[in-house]
Amino acid sequence: MADNSEKMVYLHGDLELKIVEARCLPNMDLTTERLRRCFTACDTCTSAHSSHHAPGDQKIKKHHRRIITSDPYVTVVVPQATVARTHVIANSQNPRWHDHFNIPLAHPVVDLEFQVKDDDAFGSQLIGTVSIPAARVASGEHISG
């Protein structure tokens, strides 16, 4: 416990924060897409067999395969509080938010945590986390990465 209290910094003031982008996020929606296909498989089978065409009728089907990827957003978390959240960008593995926040803080913090999540109909999934030491934030230096 003594080790944690040494790292703890009391962040007090306004934190100016800009969340720009993420790159090469994993596709978290593969499982969701597979479930969706299972639930709609019966409907697809019946509609494909039920269409009757007269001789000479030509039916042209165009299949555009849409790649389903994550619907990412970022939350900024201090102990027991989410202090900021970006908007969701649909179907993107390389999202660009360019969201700007001015966050009033008055928290004892070890790390400022950025959680990248996938917004989904079944609830959000954690894609990844980045932690920045509160001491580095308190120093006032410009942090980028």
Image (spheres, rainbow, N blue to C red):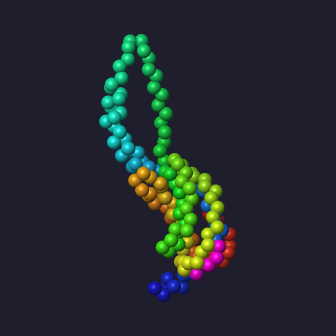
Please give the name of the residue rendered at 44% of the width and 49% of the height, measured from the top-left corner: 29
Q: Nearer the viewer, residue 24 or 9?
A: 9
Q: Residue 131's image quarter? A: bottom right
Q: Nearer the viewer, residue 126 or 85?
A: 85
Q: Nearer the viewer, residue 119 or 28?
A: 119
Where 8 sits versus 58, above or below?
A: below
Residue 75 in the image, given as x and y percentages of width and height? 53, 63
For the image shown, how many numbered marks are present on the structure?
0
Residue 54 in the image, given as x and y percentages of width and height? 38, 14
Please give the name of the residue rendered at 35% of the width and 19% of the height, measured from the top-left corner: 52
Residue 43 in the image, given as x and y percentages of width and height? 34, 35
Please give the name of the residue rendered at 56% of the width and 78% of the height, measured from the top-left corner: 107
The magenta-colored residue range is: 10-14
Please give the name of the residue rendered at 47% of the width and 44% of the height, measured from the top-left corner: 68
Residue 83 in the image, given as x and y percentages of width and height? 55, 68
Q: Quadrant of the C terminus?
A: bottom right
Residue 11 painted magenta:
yes
- Taking the image as shown, residue 21 lies to the left or right of residue 3, namely right
Task: Determine the main secondary structure of the stretch shown in magenta.
Answer: strand
Asked whether residue 143 appears in the rendered view, the answer is no
Asked whether residue 77 appears in the rendered view, the answer is yes
- Taking the image as shown, residue 114 lies to the left or right of residue 59, namely right
